[in-house]
Image (cartoon, rainbow, N blue to C red):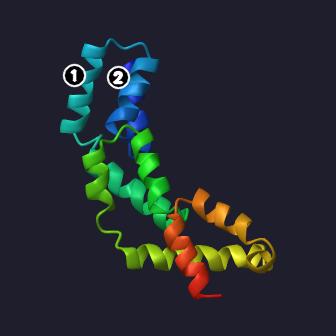
Amino acid sequence: MNWKEKTRRWCARSERSRGEVLKRLSELDVPSSEAEEYLSLLESTDFVNQTRFMSAFTHDHFVLKNWGPLKIKEGLFLKGCSSGEISSTLMPFTPLIIKEKLVEVISIRQKTEPFERQSNKPRLIRYLQSRGFPLELIMEVLDSSS
């Protein structure tokens, strides 16, 4: 199987970003000029769609993996997305939606660590920050519900 077929099949399995595809093509030792040309072909046939990828990534990580906006932003950046694209993708996440997700993550965490909030608050704060929520919001939610 040649590199074009491998790449096409790989893109068909899951949403891919432009950066991921270019990285994959370089790993397959495809010259950069051919890689760019083939990426354009994949985009024209809708195998690769940056907007669709970013929307799917954001939805899956926010809804299914309970990531906060900071971690999603970093994840998109690591996938090769530009700052402008990331900003426009994260625009629908209002502070209220983020706050509701944070409250949900805290309640899930309390089921596994029921006394963490009282006995080890710094540990809970570190956990929530590692999930990608801003410290100011974490402190606001923890102080208001104490």
Quadrant of residue 66 within the rendered picture: bottom right
Between 78 and 55, the one nearer to me in the picture: 78
Rendered location of residue 13, percent (x, y): 44, 43
Left or right, 3 with respect to 122, comes to left
Say which amino acid is labelled 1.
Glu
Label 1 or label 2, whichever comes before in sequence order: 2
Q: Is residue 25 above or below residue 12?
A: above
Q: Which circle marks residue 37 in the picture?
A: 1
Asked whether residue 8 is in view, the answer is no
Check the picture and name the quadrant holding the C terminus.
Answer: bottom right
Check the picture and name the quadrant holding the N terminus.
Answer: top left
Q: Residue furthest left?
A: 44
| Residue at x 37%, y 31% (from the top left corner) | 21
Which residue position is annotated with label 2?
4
Q: The residue tagged with tag 2: helix, strand or loop?
A: helix
Rendered location of residue 46, percent (x, y): 24, 43
Left or right, 126 with respect to 55, comes to right
Query: What is the crowding at mark 1: few (fewer than 14 residues within 10 Å), some, or many (at least 20)?
Result: few
